[in-house]
Image (cartoon, grey):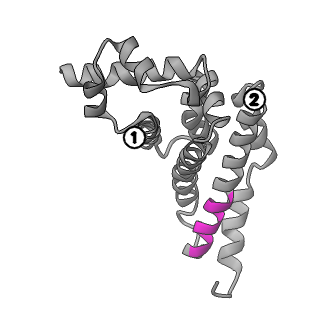
Amino acid sequence: MAQQYTRKAIRETFIQMISVQPLDKVTVKDIVTACQINRNTFYYYYQDIYAILDEIFQSEIQKVIEEYNDTLSWEDGCLLACRFAINNRKAIYNIYNSIQKDQLERYIYSVSGQVMERFVANKAIGISAAPSDIKLIAAFYQSALTAMVLNWIGGGMKQEPQQVIQRIGRLFDGNIDASLRRSAQLNDKW
């Protein structure tokens, strides 16, 4: 119980700190002072500050996997995936502008993939689309969503993501179904 409390305290302190200052300005010393623990305790849980960041992203990916279900649209899944960014805008913006930007990009790409792979696979049920096309369609939308989210973060996260995602959903409504049906009509093996 104490271990879970300490780990949680370190994570929450880290998120608070990167919400007010750039990631590269946060030190282990800052975290242990704020948590009132010693350095050895910190290193018992984490190799370095970047390990905290990795754990946070892995935890968020797991939450999306657990919460996303077949009744959700890709838009709802995307909003679910963006929840951490929405709730921690300043922290995410500071990560985006740090040398650890690649961890953020991998997180977004992974979450977008989880959402789109499941959504496209569910849409493909009953359509004899080629499995390689199903993967290709999901990968295309995964890349598009990743780029959209990264552009939103890079732009300072000023727009409300729900409005943008719903607008994209309306503009592209039916395209995944149409692509899957086209795949079923194509005779060539790709």
Local secondary structure at mark 2: helix
Q: Is residue 16 left or right of residue 66?
A: right
Q: Position of residue 17 (x, y in %)?
A: 52, 18
Quadrant of the frame with the C terminus = bottom right
Distance between mark 1 and mark 2 Cα atoms: 24 Å
What residue appears at the point 65 percent right and 36 percent down from the top-left corner?
96
What residue appears at the point 72 percent right and 48 percent down from the top-left corner?
147
The residue carrying mark 1 is 66
The residue carrying mark 2 is 163
Q: Report the residue that reaches farthest toward the right.
A: 171
Callout 1 crowding tier (Cα within 10 Å): few <14, some 14–19, many ≥20 = few
Q: 72 or 126: which is nearer to us?
A: 72
Q: Is residue 152 left or right of residue 80?
A: right
Q: Is residue 98 left or right of residue 65?
A: right
Kindly identify the amino acid type of the residue bearing the numbered disc 1: Glu
Kindly identify the amino acid type of the residue bearing the numbered disc 2: Gln
Which numbered disc covers residue 130? Answer: none
Quadrant of the frame with the N terminus = top left
Q: 115 or 170: which is nearer to us?
A: 115
Q: Is residue 81 left or right of residue 51?
A: right
Local secondary structure at mark 1: helix
Magenta part of the chain: 132-140
